[in-house]
Image: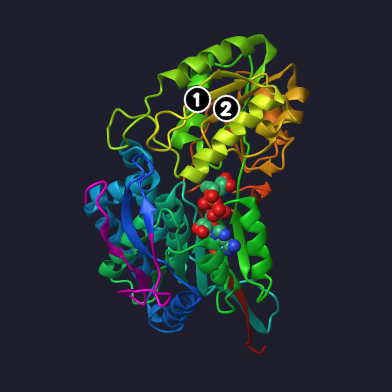
Amino acid sequence: MADGRVVAAQELLIDGRRVPPLSGRYYQTLNPATERAIATVAEAGVDDVDAAVRSARVAFEGEWSQIRAAERGHLLLKLAELIRRDQDEIVELESLDTGKPVSSIRRQDLPAVLDTLAYYAGLADKINGQVIPTRADALTYTVREPLGVVAAIVPWNFPLMIGMWKIVPALACGCTVVLKPAEITPLSALKIGELAIEAGFPAGVLNVLPGFGRVAGQALVDHPDIDKVTFTGSPSVGRQILKGAAGNLKRVTLELGGKSANIIFPDADLDAAVKAAAAGIFFNSGQVCSAGSRILVHDAVHDEVVERLAARAESIRLGDPRDSATGMGPLVSKVQMNSVLGYIDIGVKEGASIVTGGGRVGDTGYFVAPTVFAGVQHDMRISQEEIFGPVAAVLRFKDEDDALRMANGTAFSLAAGIWSADIRRVHRFIRRLKAGTVWVNTFGPTDVRLPWGGSRDSGFGREHGDMAIENFTEPKAVWINTGR
Ligand code: NAD
C-alpha cells in the first residue's frame, strides 16, 4: 500500500465475512497529510446495521454463549499475537487515516492496545458473583451475565486505541459487538475485525461497520435489539445517543469532551511543568479529549511560563507522519482544520493575544502551527469551548481560590493537572477539582487498569479496569429454597 494509491475496496465485516454493503454505497477516505485518497470504503446503511445486529444476536445466543470464559481470554491473547505480527501494517493504516506520526502510534497507541488485550484476557475468567447469606432455608447468590449485543461507536482521534478500549472488555465479558468507527478513520477497525476472524472468534461476535454517524450510528442507537451503547465522541452526539437509547432503555456509557485545566504554581518544577504542559496540549495535534487546553499559571511565574511554552511550541517539528523525526502531524480533516482556525480567529477577536503560531502551515495537508494564546480571560470562548486542536489558552491566576474557580468553571469535568511541591496544597486541589482524573506533577498518562471518564458535559460512566464488568454484565440474583 502506497500513499496516494487507492487501496482495495474495504467491505463491511458482518457475520465473519467481508460483505459489500446492502446500501450499495462507497465513499473515499483521505490522507490528511497529503489530501490524497487512500481507500474506497463501504458505507453501512440501515439494512446493513440490521444484518450486523442480527448476526451479533445469533452469535450471542448461540456459539459464543457456549464458550468457556477462559477460552474468551485465550481468543483475546491470540488476537494480541496477530496484532503484534501485523503491527507494521496496523500502524501504517492508523497513520494514513489520522495523520498521526508513526513513531507516536508505536510508542503510545500500540502498547496501550496490547496492554488492554492482556488485561482483559486475564479478567475474562474472573467475573465472579457472590454468595450472600440471607436466611437459614435458602442459598442466595449472584452471578454476572453478559449484557448482550453492544454497539461501540468510536471517534477519529484514537480510532484503534479507543476502539479496543470498548470491544476488548465487551468480548471478555461475553458480549457480542457491532463496532462503528468514525467515518473518516475506518481502516484499523476493519483490520482488527479481520484479525479477530483469523484468531478464531465465532462469526458474528465482532462486526465492523464503517459508515456515517447520522445513518449507521443513529441506526445502531435506535435499534431495538442493541442492549448497550458505549460511545466516545462529542457532547452534542452524546445527547442524541441518550435520546435514541430511550426507545428500548439501552444502557449507555458516554465518554465526551473536555477543557482540562493544567495548573502551575511557582513552587513547581518549572522545567517539568512546561514540558508536560506543551505535550499536554500539542500531543496528537491537540485532538485529545483530555488535552490540557487551559494552562492556568500563577502571576509570579506567568511570563516565564508563557515564554518557555512558546519556545517549546516553536521547536515542535511538523511534517510527514512517516518520518520518525516528526513531532506533530496534521489535523485529521479539512473540517477540523477550519474549525480550529475559526477558534483562533475567535480568540483574536475576543482580545487574547497570539504569542506563537496562529495559522495554517503550508497549503497541502491540514497542518496548523502549535499556537499559544496569552491574555485569555476565563469567560472567553477559547477558554470555555473545546477546540480540539493545537491551541493552548494561558490564563493567569493570583491564588488558590482563583485557580479553582477557573479550573472548575467550564461545562466539562474530565481531567485536571496540578503542579506544586506543597503536599497540603496538592491534597486540597485533589479534593476540590471537579474531574474524573487528577494528575499531580505530571499531565496526561492513562492506563487500562485505572478508571477513565468524566461527568457533566464530559459524559458519564467509566471505562477501563474492572469497571468494565459493570459496563458489560448484569447481576442476576438466585434464591434456592433449601428447606430447613
Ligand atoms: P463525534 O461525536 O462527531 O463522532 C463520534 C462518533 O459518533 C463517530 O463514529 C460518528 O460517526 C458517530 N456519530 C455521529 N453522529 C451520530 C449519531 N447521530 N448517532 C450515533 N453516532 C453518531 O466526535 P468526533 O468529532 O469523532 O470526536 C471528537 C470528540 O470526541 C471530541 O468532543 C472529544 O473530546 C471526544 N473524545 C472524548 C474522549 C473521552 O475519552 N472522553 C476521547 C476521545 C474523544
Quick check: 238 above or below 476?
above
Name the residue that disc number 2 marks: 392
- Range of magenta residues: 1-27
Dot 2 or dot 1: first in sequence order is 1
Task: Pick whichever, 73 or 386, lies toward us.
Answer: 386
Q: Quadrant of the C terminus?
A: bottom right
Q: Give the residue at x 36% y 70%.
A: 13
Q: Give the residue at x 58% y 69%.
A: 221
Task: Pick whichever, 32 or 326, lies toward us.
Answer: 32
Quick check: 212 above or below 46?
above
Q: Position of residue 97 (x, y in %)?
A: 37, 49
**What is the quadrant of residue 33 in the picture?**
top left
Task: Name the outermost residue toward the bottom.
Answer: 483
Q: Is residue 158 left or right of residue 290?
A: left
Q: Position of residue 363 (x, y in %)?
A: 40, 33
Q: Amino acid at mark 1?
A: Ala
Q: Give the residue at x 46% y 35%.
A: 285
Quick check: 136 above or below 321?
below
Q: Position of residue 211 (x, y in %)?
A: 45, 64
**What is the quadrant of residue 136 in the picture?**
bottom right
* CA–CA distance in space, label 2 to label 1: 8 Å
Q: Is residue 102 left or right of residue 348?
A: left
- Circle 2 sits in a helix, a strand or a loop, which is it? strand
Characterize the local packing of mark 1: few (<14), some (14-19) or many (20 or more) Cα atoms within 10 angstroms.
Answer: many
Quick check: 417 above or below 57?
above
Name the residue that disc number 1 marks: 278
Task: Pick whichever, 227 or 447, lies toward us.
Answer: 227
